[in-house]
Image (cartoon, rainbow, N blue to C red):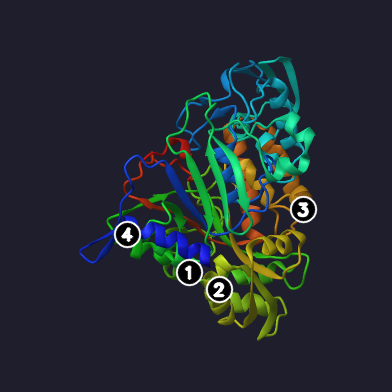
Amino acid sequence: MKKFTAILATAAMAITMVGGTLNVSAAAGDTDLTIAVDSDIDTLHASDFSTTIESSILNQIYDTLLYMNPDGEHDPEPRIAESYTISDDGLDYTFYLRDDETFHDGTALTAADVKFSLELYMNSNYQGDKVTGLSSVEVVDDYTVVCHLESAYSPFLLGVCQVYIASEAYYESSADDFASSPVGSGPYKFVSRTKGSNIVLEAYDGYYRGEAAIQTLTYEVIPDQSTTAIALQTGEIDFAEIDSSILTQLAANSSIRIEEVSTSGFSYVCMNLDTEPFDNVLVRQAINYALNRENIVAVCYDGEAEVNSNICSKDRFGYSEDQLQYTYDPDKAIELLEEAGIETPYDLGTLLVAEKYSNLATVIQSDLAAVGLNVEISVQEFNSYLTDLTSGSYDITVLEMTLDGDTQSLEMAFTTDYIGTANNARYSDEEMDQLFADAQVESDTDARAEIFNQIFTKAQEEAIYAVICNPLTVYAYNSELTCPEFAFEGDYFVYDFSW
């Protein structure tokens, strides 16, 4: 608390009052940037991260072979790879690397590091979907590498563009340091981490695209959104992803700019299918009908989300209006509970949530109670919550998740191999596993769309999850900070920011 107060006091010197409103301005020639994040990280491992905050930080530290805007409307941009070719049969992707890229420790980045990194992802329980279809990696020479696919898979390029290229030598020197003190080749190098407090990065002067305008980048851990709002207005914080609870307050301040970004992320109620009564499809369907999604979006998101009970967002490949949409129908929910043999009032157990989802949990608790289903809310620190979630040590929960990239990435929520990572329902079904396997190798667009239609029809009919909506990502930042247009999914790169 003392440290937080001291920072606020320092920032206050740059504050003026305009019409009774806090007005923050950046000092001329400012090269520092502070970003607020609402929870601490657990790791900075290049391939075994699992949260959006970890991904956002790693985006600054590591570079990728290419950059591809996830909106699907732009050609890939060169990064580590200057160019690439795809064989006529679609089985071989050859990448030709720059010969002047170095890691932050000064060592050269070569094809051997690319091979090492791709193989890390192939073996990752968290990010393996980024290299779906990859069977082997061949080093031709120091600056040429070939990815061999099991079968033609058109989304492969989009996935491989998200692989962070890491140093094999650094990993071999210390696997622990690799995860806690990363050495990448991106525009920012890791400086320090104070657990529960902050992560500090600084611009890498050897970055091949030129040194970043922002020299010192600090991520401050501020779990409370009200505190984040104050920090943005006083100038302690320059940039933050915010939730709707502080949106109106910040939008009224002319010194703060607001940007809303569409994503494929989803908010959802997740039930542990290994436990009763959630192993009963009728109960899961009842919970879906019990949720007043329109009210949840109005109360918990201030309307900054699109109602959607389907895990596939409406602008994503594979979505169809023919797939079942659950609507608010408490009478139907009660009818299904009776059919399932559930006598109400019925105790569903504990609704486990991370602190950031506590408001959402309260509204859902009320919806469930209205149909005779009672839950007791238990709030945990985020990383402790993730441990219980992925180990299956919970009854029912509510959270948000993003599985971006190609629609194939949604296999992480449904297939047996991902139980313990993103398949939080612990759902296991041979037919579903096979459908995703078929979609992976299908090259015909129409045929692949039909497979996904079968997948999401099955998912909705079985009520595997109770998806609520697709929230917008909302950023708030100092109006004097120049940020380029944010791409679909909301990824940002501080290299492109400046004062």
Q: Which of marks 4 and 2 is nearer the N terminus?
A: 4
Label 2 or label 3, whichever lies nearer to me, is: 2
Q: Earlier in the sequence, mark 1 or mark 3?
A: 1
Residue 491 visible within the image? no
Query: Which residue bears the numbered disc 3?
Result: 429
Disc 2 vs disc 1: Cβ atoms closer than 8 Å? yes
Disc 3 vs disc 4: Cβ atoms closer than 8 Å? no
- For this rendering, which residue is in front, 245 or 432? 245
Q: Which of marks 3 and 4 is nearer the N terminus?
A: 4
Instruction: Residue at 74% x, 30% y: name it.
Output: 168
Distance in Å between CA atoms under marks 3 and 4: 46 Å
Query: Which residue bears the numbered disc 1?
Result: 296
Residue 283 visible within the image? yes
Query: Which residue bears the numbered disc 4?
Result: 251
Query: Which residue bears the numbered disc 2?
Result: 364
Identify the image quadrant of residue 86.
Answer: top right
- Circle 3: is it few (<14), some (14-19), or many (20+) Cα within 10 Å? few
- Circle 2: is it few (<14), some (14-19), or many (20+) Cα within 10 Å? many
Q: Which of marks 2 and 1 is nearer the N terminus?
A: 1
Distance in Å between CA atoms under marks 2 and 3: 28 Å
- For this rendering, which residue is in front, 195 or 64? 195
Tag 3: amino acid: Asp
In this rendering, the answer to whether 344 lies above or below 123 is: below
Identify the image quadrant of residue 372.
Answer: bottom right
